[in-house]
Amino acid sequence: MSKDTRLARVAHVLVHMSFNEGTATSETIAAMLDTNPVVVRRIMGALREGGYVSSERGPKGGWQLERPLHEITFLNIYKAFEPGSPFTIATSDDHPKCAVERSANRALSRALSEAAARFEQALSKITLDQLLPGKG
Amino acid sequence: MSKDTRLARVAHVLVHMSFNEGTATSETIAAMLDTNPVVVRRIMGALREGGYVSSERGPKGGWQLERPLHEITFLNIYKAFEPGSPFTIATSDDHPKCAVERSANRALSRALSEAAARFEQALSKITLDQLLPGKG
DNA sequence: CGATTTTGTCACTGTGTCTGTTGCGATAAC
DNA sequence: GTTATCGCAACAGACACAGTGACAAAATCG
């Protein structure tokens, strides 16, 4: 299944942006990630909605960090992407009236919810400043 | 992302099979799941490897439960499918030598592992007999 | 104003996995 | 030998992120 690597990539980028103090263009960031400026704009655009970065158009434009690293968690980034379930596993709704299927779905949903809660809890404890060299 | 509904579907099927005591053909099971016999064979084939069901060819053939419901957990079924990571989220390995990327990957991997462990722990507590009507 | 830089956005293709389907071979009962 | 059934290969479909090209919008600078 194709994997979503946006969280790891954007975390990487934001830390590097904090080094350079100033604006970074999509082109520059794309070079850092071995990818395309459009991909960068898509990813960074989601973060802008959350107020973590801002963008300016035109010459001298680009992307800028709006918050210090210690105020941004992996959970913040994760939520900014408005993800659906982070799981490849899902319930099946072929027979909504079948008591057995409903039980099975209920049990599976509970397991998925518990795991998702654990995931978000773990993400909430990771701040970007923890990724600075010499801290991890 | 396309979702994997095999766990929920096969749990559903196994419980129904326990009602009927005897063999069920792929055709019959497919009708129960609103799907195709080939899909059923693919899913059930994985379970056969784990010894949870057996199959017979020819007339009077079909699928049969090999273990009582209380001896089969969701975790057993899940593992039978030899899944990779159950997450749509993954680390990014564009710059293996970058200390920041490595930190980010390490942090993310830890969060994913914790969540996966929680998921499997939850699945291990669900036995198929808990899905019987009047028990869930 | 006009040229240049840069983001914003659309449209399309590529990729990987589960699902759905068809076709055919293998096996067992009768 | 006919029939029922699994086994398996091959292919198309759906879906979500990644990658790419094209062009519009906006801001700077001369």
Image (cartoon, coloured by chain):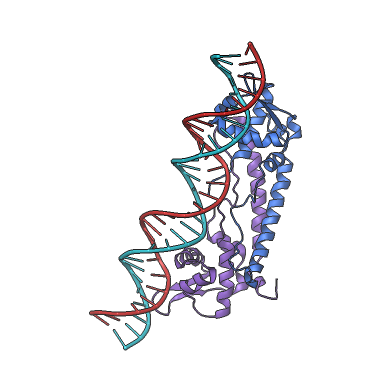
Chain colours: A purple, B blue, C red, D cyan
Viewer-closest of D20 and B121: D20
Residue B48's quadrant in the figure? top right
Give percent across and percent down for residue A115. 67, 50
Residue ID at (66%, 30%) = B14
Residue ID at (70%, 74%) = A135
Instruction: Identify the image quadrant of the C terminus of chain B.
Output: top right
Q: Is residue C21 above or below residue A29?
A: above
Viewer-closest of A67 and D2: D2
Give percent across and percent down for residue C23. 48, 30
Image side of residue A95 versus residue A26, left or right: right
Q: Residue furthest right?
A: B71
Q: Is residue A109 above or below residue A120?
A: above
Q: Is residue A69 above or below residue B91?
A: below
Give percent across and percent down for residue D23. 31, 65
Residue A96's quadrant in the figure? top right
Give percent across and percent down for residue A30. 50, 70
Can the viewer see residue A94 in this picture?
yes
Viewer-closest of A25 and A2: A2
**How many callouts does the rendering have?**
0
Can the viewer see residue A84 in this picture?
no
